[in-house]
Image (cartoon, grey):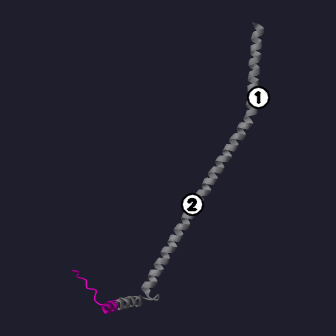
Amino acid sequence: MSRHNPGNFADRLENAAKAKQALMESFRSKPDLNDPEVAARLAERKAAAEAREAREAAKREAKHAEIARLKAEKLAAAEAKAAKLREEAARKPAGRARLSSILASHQAMREARKGRA
């Protein structure tokens, strides 16, 4: 047997009315915005929101600074590579001339040996 006795329809209507009345009383008993406690909580929430926004702005700024730093590093690396390539290009004709002079001196030495022998 069930111990729960839902009662009749009138009892259920009465219980529903009591629940609705309790809900209305809890709504009416809430303090309004002029209450000092409510104002303090709102001020606390506003301060927390401003602090959160400041942290997020600092994160965004740090992220942008990091991106700018990485771009600057890439640019510096590209410029260093370009300078190295320019330097190598400038050395190549001098290296070729030096190589040709060495080859010419070796050729002269071979010819001189052939002439002596």
Residue tagged by mark 1?
Answer: 97
> What residue type is disc 2 on?
Lys
Query: Can you give x and y, in whole percent of width and height, for residue 115 in the image?
Result: 78, 9
Query: Can you give x and y, in whole percent of width and height, for residue 28 in the image?
Result: 41, 91
- 15 horizontally vs 44: left or right: left
Callout 1 crowding tier (Cα within 10 Å): few <14, some 14–19, many ≥20: few
Give above or below for 108 relative to 45. above
In what element is the residue under mark 2?
helix
Quadrant of the rendering where the C terminus is positioned? top right
Most extreme residue toward the top, as rendered? 117
Residue tagged by mark 2?
Answer: 63
Quadrant of the rendering where the N terminus is positioned? bottom left
- 95 horizontally vs 17: left or right: right
Q: Earlier in the sequence, mark 2 or mark 1?
A: 2
In what element is the residue under mark 1?
helix
- Residue 38, quarter of picture: bottom left
- Residue 93, quarter of picture: top right
Query: Can you give x and y, in whole percent of width and height, for residue 54 in the image?
Result: 53, 69
- 73 horizontally vs 11: left or right: right
- 56 horizontally vs 117: left or right: left
Q: Nearer the viewer, residue 2 or 65?
A: 2
Most extreme residue toward the left, as rendered? 1
Query: Can you give x and y, in whole percent of width and height, for residue 94 in the image?
Result: 75, 32
Residue at image x 52%, y 74%?
50
Residue at image x 77%, y 21%?
104
Tell me if residue 13 is in the magenta stretch.
yes
Q: Which mark is residue 47?
A: none
Q: How many marks?
A: 2
Range of the magenta residues? 1-15
> What residue type is disc 1 on?
Ala
Calculate the distance from the C-alpha at mark 2 to the C-alpha at mark 1. Answer: 51 Å
